[in-house]
Amino acid sequence: ETHLQAQVRAAQREAQEKQELVESLREERKTLREAAFQQQEEITALRTRSGAVAGLQSRLQALEGDLQDELRAKRELEDKLRKAEAKARRATAFPNQSLSSFLPSDREAGGAGGGG
């Protein structure tokens, strides 16, 4: 009976060790799942930020395009102003010529209806 009791105790000890191992593995699995969930949240946050950055870059490119358009329009206006000033100087230098010869042509004024 002593030998039998020893076998029972050994079996109980082995069962207890296996139960502890199962519990340890469950805890480890839970920890790994939590870490995976945390990483997924970080990935989602990074994707969100990445999308925001892409949106800002797109907006910046659009603003740069608008700025280039504004600069081009400004240069065109400055060019028209220089031409008008030159005609005005010629008009005051040669007052006997008819006024119409100093007015901008349709082409210079930007087409029919004047350039504004």
Image (spheres, rainbow, N blue to C red):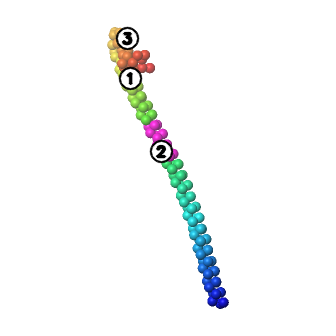
Where is residue 46? Give x, y as percent.
51, 52
Read off the magenta span.
51-64
The residue depicted at 51 percent of the width and 45 percent of the height is: 52
The part of the image, by quadrant, that contains residue 22 is: bottom right
Does residue 54 appear left or right of residue 34 in this picture? left
Instruction: Give 56 or 107, whichever is nearer the viewer.
Output: 56
The residue depicted at 61 percent of the width and 83 percent of the height is: 10
Q: Is residue 62 magenta?
A: yes
Camera-near label (2 vs 3) is 2
Crowdedness near tag 1: few (<14), some (14–19) or many (≥20) residues, C-alpha within 10 Å: some
Where is residue 98? Give x, y as percent.
35, 9
Where is mark 1, residue-wise? Answer: 80
Q: Is residue 55 magenta?
A: yes
Where is residue 62? Give x, y as percent.
46, 37
Mainly helix, strand or loop, the magenta region? helix
Q: Is residue 85 visible?
A: no
Instruction: Give 91 or 10, whichever is nearer the viewer.
Output: 10
Camera-near label (2 vs 1) is 2
Query: Helix, strand or loop at disc 3?
Result: helix
Q: Which mark is residue 54?
A: 2
Q: Which mark is residue 99?
A: 3
Contact? badges 2 and 1 (CB < 8 Å): no
The N terminus, quarter of image: bottom right
Q: Amino acid at mark 1?
A: Lys
Return the disc, 2 or 1, that comes first in the chain's sequence.
2
Q: Amino acid at mark 3?
A: Leu
Cα–Cα gap, marks 2 and 3: 57 Å
Where is residue 2? Give x, y as percent.
65, 90
Q: Amino acid at mark 2?
A: Ala
Crowdedness near tag 3: few (<14), some (14–19) or many (≥20) residues, C-alpha within 10 Å: few
The part of the image, by quadrant, that contains residue 70 is: top left
Cα–Cα gap, marks 2 and 1: 39 Å
